[in-house]
Amino acid sequence: MVKNTIAIDAMGGDKAPKAVITGLAISAVRNPNTNYIIYGDENKILPLIKNREHLKKVSKIVHVEDWIRGDEKASKSLRRARTTSMGLAISAVATGEADAIVSAGNSGALLAMSIFGLKKLSGISRPALAAVMPTVSGEVVVLDLGANIDCSSQNLIDFSVMGIVFAMNVLGKPYPRLAFLNVGEEENKGKNIIHEASGVLESSHFSSFYKGYAEGDKIITGDFDVVVCDGFSGNVLLKTAEGTAKLCTEYLKQVFSSSLLGKISYAIGRASFLSIRKKMDPRKHNGAVLLGLNGIVVKSHGGTDSIGFAHAVDLANEMSIGKYNELIKTELDKLNPIHDKK
């Protein structure tokens, strides 16, 4: 069996490299047929990996002393692509040494370096960050989540193409239902770019997938499989959802620890409450995919812990083993008529 190879930016993220290596060890157990190339400071990585024999057997450490800082400007990071852990990990994907890269580092730097190093897919105006979020009845893929703050109607159309293909091939949805995030469901609500993109979809062969506009509270109802928006709205949506999940978890803790009755209630329904907690845990859905590039790039949340990082690595494994980028290229070629309508 041919092994999959994932490049890891060990120095990216608030808790790197400890959370990165610990999370990688968790994912390595779940994905035994994967090799890893770990880029980072060997002096910090070796003590973390020395007692994890299963990870050592499938890992190669490339010593890199420099890394991208969390507040570093993308323009500066581009100039240091050849000397940093993030840049060298991206280069490994570009040269074919690795099938995907996972980083919890600076989002702007990752975006800029990935576009420069991997190049955009033919026919795509801009790449987009996409993530899978839980709903009442399943999952929904949302994009863009912050890669593009200002968007044109063409960008939204491209995001729609990538989102539909992603939903088909990653979520297994043969007829994904797509909507644009908007301030209202009425046709006259929202920005002109949304109206323009909506018009293109309605008059294209995507019309059977397109379901119109969705307000923020409809995203988790399970009525849609793909929700498209600009990066500003998407990032606010994502962070608000994560904050709400944490708030609900904190409320449950307070209710079940504030009184004797609460503690008794928790003891009686402990299994059910733990199940709810797991479903609400944002770490279980950690990992946004940078779609639209000639390579698989997975962005882990910068503040995540080892459990969250492990899920990001799992996602990279799933996409690279399933050759999802190749499928996206194939489907984009089939769906080219939509670009003729722009």
Image: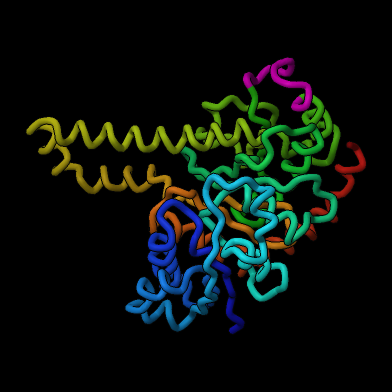
Q: State yes or no: residue 192 in magenta.
A: yes
How far across and how far down the image is residue 93, in percent?
Answer: 67, 68
Horizontal arrangement in the rendering, residue 175 relative to residue 220 (left or right): right
Q: Is residue 234 above or below residue 284?
A: above
Q: State yes or no: residue 226 in magenta.
A: no
Q: Quadrant of the C terminus?
A: top right
The magenta span reads: 183-194
Q: Nearer the viewer, residue 70 or 134?
A: 70
Q: Nearer the viewer, residue 105 or 152?
A: 105
Residue occupying image coordinates x 73% and y 52%: 292
How far across and how far down the image is residue 33, in percent?
Answer: 52, 78
Residue 243 in which image quadrant: top left
How far across and how far down the image is residue 187, in percent?
Answer: 73, 18
Residue at the extreme left of the image, as rendered:
260
Q: Is residue 222 above or below residue 286?
A: above
Residue occupying image coordinates x 77% and y 43%: 158
Tell how many labels.
0
Horizontal arrangement in the rendering, residue 111 relative to residue 200 (left or right): left
